[in-house]
Image (spheres, helix red, strand yellow):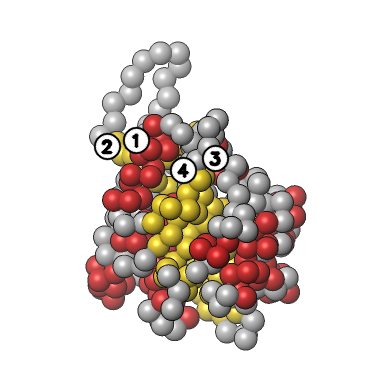
């Protein structure tokens, strides 16, 4: 049996969030807000904590700085039982950090410092531990500077050879980002970009065309997150469906896609079918949106499952 249920490798960031953001005063001055939070976010960090909250034995793989933010990230992950023994920190590194100003509608302009996400590297000595999992997740491909130069693909290949189910989320804004992302696609069971990222990478627009583009590059299933429009799923066996979003009051959308990744992994570990897996992942994402800061609204597997069963969906577009 694998040592871990879930390895979440990639983008981890220290977030400082305020709500509601209404204006930025010119020059000096103070704007009062109602809520303030700190969170570990990112496509790796949010997924690690949300998965751990829902019962998965989780290994975090990333880099943090030897600074106060890095210390807090390690403590916060450990608080939820996430194994931090594969997190690297070296003198001179600075923890990836964001200042997030969340508006009333849940949107969130941010200031971000890339930091140690770009520094860490999974070498051959660490590799066996990293891939000793049921589910291996690469979150934030395109942001991991050292790993994006071919090593992500090597790690994913090893994970597949070791029997892992693999999931991938990306950071992409143009076709130029395909260089790093193409390396991992032949070893990806579930590719889970936002539709905007998929469009930026491929130059295509229609959901079915986007899915076929990535399936042709080797992924087993393409799972496009559509924000308020839900999710589009399309796999290599020909199954496809659109699932509408849950109808919830949104407080903050920070980390919603990353929480979706965690919910997807939890559903896979529990043996759910494709439609239930997507719906459970959406429930995790929707709960995330009800709190301030990544995974704030996610509490447990049981509460997520109950939410999934009881909460209505938005009308189909």
* Label whose residue precedes the other's in the sequence (3 or 2): 2
The answer to whether mark 1 and mark 3 are in CB contact below 8 A is no
For disc 4, the neighbor class at 10 Å (few under 14, some 14 to 19, many from 20) is many
- Judging depth in this view, the residue of 312 and 79 nearest the camera is 79
C-alpha separation, residue under disc 4 versus residue under disc 2 = 20 Å
Precedes in sequence: disc 1 or disc 2: 1
- What is the secondary structure assignment of the residue under circle 2? strand
Residue 305 percent coordinates (x, y):
29, 73
Instruction: Kindly identify the residue that appears in the image at 24 percent across and 67 percent down.
Output: 303
x and y percent of residue 101 in the render?
A: 41, 35
Residue 46 x, y percent position in the rendering: 42, 53
Q: Tell me the SS state at disc 3.
A: helix
Mark nearer the viewer, 3 or 2: 3
Identify the secondary structure beneath mark 1: strand
Q: CA distance from mark 1 to mark 2?
A: 6 Å
Rendered view: 116 above or below 49: above
Residue receiving disc 2: 35
Frontmost of labels 4 and 3 is 3
Q: Earlier in the sequence, mark 1 or mark 4?
A: 4
Q: Which residue is mark 1?
A: 18
Tag of residue 13: 4
Q: Are marks 1 and 4 in contact (CB under 8 Å)?
A: no
Q: Earlier in the sequence, mark 4 or mark 3?
A: 4
State the CA–CA distance, disc 3 to disc 2. 28 Å
State yes or no: discs 1 and 2 in contact (Cβ < 8 Å): yes
Which comes sooner in the sequence, label 4 or label 2? 4
Q: CA distance from mark 4 to mark 3?
A: 9 Å
| Residue annotated with mark 3 | 116
Whether 23 is drawn above or below 148: the answer is above
Whether 279 is drawn above or below 79: the answer is below
């Amino acid at each position: 049996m694998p040592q871990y249920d879930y390895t979440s490798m990639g983008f981890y960031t220290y977030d400082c969030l305020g709500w509601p953001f209404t204006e930025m005063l010119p020059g000096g001055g103070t704007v009062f807000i109602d809520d303030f939070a700190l969170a570990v976010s990112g496509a790796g960090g949010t997924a690690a904590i949300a998965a751990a909250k829902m019962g998965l034995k989780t290994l975090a793989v990333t880099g943090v700085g030897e600074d106060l933010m890095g210390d807090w990230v390690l403590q916060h992950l450990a608080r939820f039982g996430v194994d931090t023994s594969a997190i690297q920190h070296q003198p001179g590194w600075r923890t990836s950090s964001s200042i997030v100003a969340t508006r009333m509608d849940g949107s969130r302009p941010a200031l971000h410092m890339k930091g140690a996400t770009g520094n860490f590297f999974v070498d051959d000595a660490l590799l066996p531990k990293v891939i000793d999992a049921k589910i291996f997740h690469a979150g934030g491909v395109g942001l991991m500077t050292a790993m994006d130069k071919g090593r992500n693909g090597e790690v994913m290949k090893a994970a597949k050879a070791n029997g892992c189910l693999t999931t991938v989320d990306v950071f992409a804004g143009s076709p130029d980002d395909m260089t790093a992302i193409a390396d991992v696609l032949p070893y990806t069971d579930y590719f889970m970009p936002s539709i905007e990222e998929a469009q930026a990478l491929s130059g295509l627009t229609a959901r079915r065309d986007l899915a076929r583009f990535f399936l042709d590059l080797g992924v087993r299933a393409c799972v496009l997150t559509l924000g308020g429009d839900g999710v589009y799923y399309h796999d290599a066996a020909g199954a496809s469906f659109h699932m509408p979003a849950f109808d919830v009051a949104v407080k903050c959308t920070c980390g919603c896609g990353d929480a979706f990744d965690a919910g997807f992994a939890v559903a896979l570990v529990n043996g759910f079918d494709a439609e239930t897996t997507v719906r459970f992942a959406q429930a995790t994402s929707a709960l995330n949106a009800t709190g301030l800061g990544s995974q704030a609204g996610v509490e447990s597997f049981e509460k997520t499952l109950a939410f999934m069963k009881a909460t209505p969906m938005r009308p189909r577009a």
